[in-house]
Image: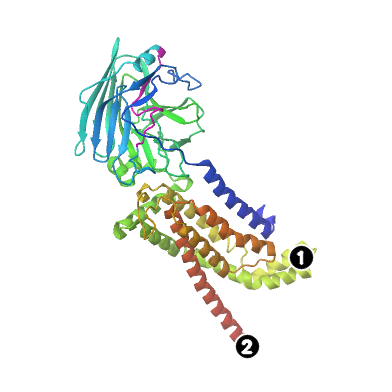
Amino acid sequence: MLDKLSTQKRLIIATVISVLFFIAYDALFAPKPLIDTNKTVEQNQSAPATNLANSTTDKAVIAPKQISKNIATIEGATYSATIDELGRISNFTLKDSKFKNENGEQISLLKPSSPLPLEIRFSDTAINEKAFKVAYTVSSDKIDATKSPANITLTQNLDSFSVVKNLTFHPDGSYDIDVNVNSNHEYFITAGFRPIVAVDGYTVHGVLLRKEDDSLEIIEDGDAKGNEIFRSVDLLANSDRYYTTLFYDNKRSMEVFIQNDADENTLSFARNIGNFSAKGYIGPKDYKTLKAIEPSLVDTIEYGWFTFIAKPAFLLLDWLYSFIGNWGFAIVALTIIIRIVLFPLTYKGMVSMNKLKELAPRMKEIQTKYKGDPQKINAHVMELYRKHGANPMGGCLPILIQIPIFFAIYRVLLNAIELKGAEWILWINDLAELDPYFILPILMGITMYIQQHITPTNFTDPMQEKIMKFLPLIFTFFFITFPAGLTLYWFINNLCSIAQQMVVNKIFARHKAQEIAEKRHEH
């Protein structure tokens, strides 16, 4: 169908799609406000829909407001946490200096008004009401897990039976949980709501599951159907762009229920009767940290359709960083390596564009000579292509092949929390944030314009040229809000394109000069 469209129409469609992509991305993933962390939190203590397996909505069972007091504190090497009197992890604050909000305060990953990690909800409404009113007792009110694992036991007595949570916290943000409910009452336990840190306008929220066949199921906010059931799950992660709260169980014994709350946020629970054992983690989706805890946890770092390209690309970026010691220069090196690997394809495309430019005047003559007869125009143009070895798709195919690579690198640089707080040079103090002075986006736009200027074109319509001239301006406008690391990649990529195009242009010019000289010699 596309081959029937004129070059102008194809160009207009490509431009519109590019613009719509950036507008939609910016609109869909708008930042959300940061939540303050408090030592005590005020909230409704009743669980939403107690019979999760059968309910069709997630309505709250109204209970009087009350203060949920913290009864224990945990100090890890990378975090500080608290446990409230309902047996939940009520606060989880990251210690690293790069994890700060816009006010310079260390961020907490938990939202007090949403399901907190280790929260239990019973199917029986009466028992559930009581469970959200009876306080847990704790074996110790201070836990030191800064250097080695530390244990704590939480106990809740609910008339005819009790709930016991044995927890072991590790220095890195992971923990072991063993729950014993000495009754046959069905209950649901959660790893917690997704982290609520609003880092920028590109955050994707939702739940990730790894199923029995090792495939990943991703349910973004607003996409859950309600009361979905997944069995034999070994990984249940509630995530945003940078952070996660998760359960994992190598025995694949988790039966997971997915629901929506009133705001279409996706909620996840593990269904149980009796005992429940799993391992958990709260914190950043840092590749090395997750791999050290459990290698398969790196699946929580999700790159979309082109994960098979993005994963090795990140590993290469990480390897380059290990040698260079600067994430910005690692991005520069990664970009150059990719351009070198793709150069054979790029070269073919550039040569094809030069040939088409050379033939443009003759194509215009054919169009003028056979005006009103599309079949003859097409036949003579194709003959012209065959005679001179030109391929009208030669310039497009290399670009199409590179698109998956671009999107893979895009997701790598967008999702890598390793770039948060990472400096490059001079004014770039955080590659995960936008350029504060917009220097990189402007340089990106300038290099895009230069690249256009030196790239051969075969436009026969002035409108096409006008559209192309506006593209650098449009892209500059959208890249102003992009993370500096991503803009750096595109800027270096443009510089490589300019260098390669200049080389190809010189080679082509030399070849053309030789042809002219040979023809003169023949005469």
Check disc 2 and give the amino acid type: Arg
Rendered location of residue 519, percent (x, y)? 62, 85
Do we see residue 249 in this rendering? Answer: no
Segment colored magenta: 108-125
Residue 414 horizontal/vertical position (percent): 43, 49
How packed is label 1: few (under 14 Cα within 10 Å), some, or many (20 or more)?
Answer: some
Q: Position of residue 372 (x, y in %)?
A: 80, 63
Was residue 219 drawn as part of the magenta stretch in this picture?
no
- Residue sitting farthest toward the top: 160
Q: Residue at x 46, y 31 (%)?
A: 266
Contact, mark 1 vs mark 2 (Cβ under 8 Å): no
* Element under disc 1: helix
Q: Which residue is identified by label 1?
A: 376
Q: Is residue 50 above or below residue 468?
A: above
Residue 518 lies left or right of residue 177; in this view the side is right
Q: How busy is the neighbourhood of tag 2: few (under 14 within 10 Å), some, or many (20 plus)?
A: few
Q: Of residues 131 and 412, which is closer to you in this image?
A: 131
The residue to which callout 2 is attached is: 520
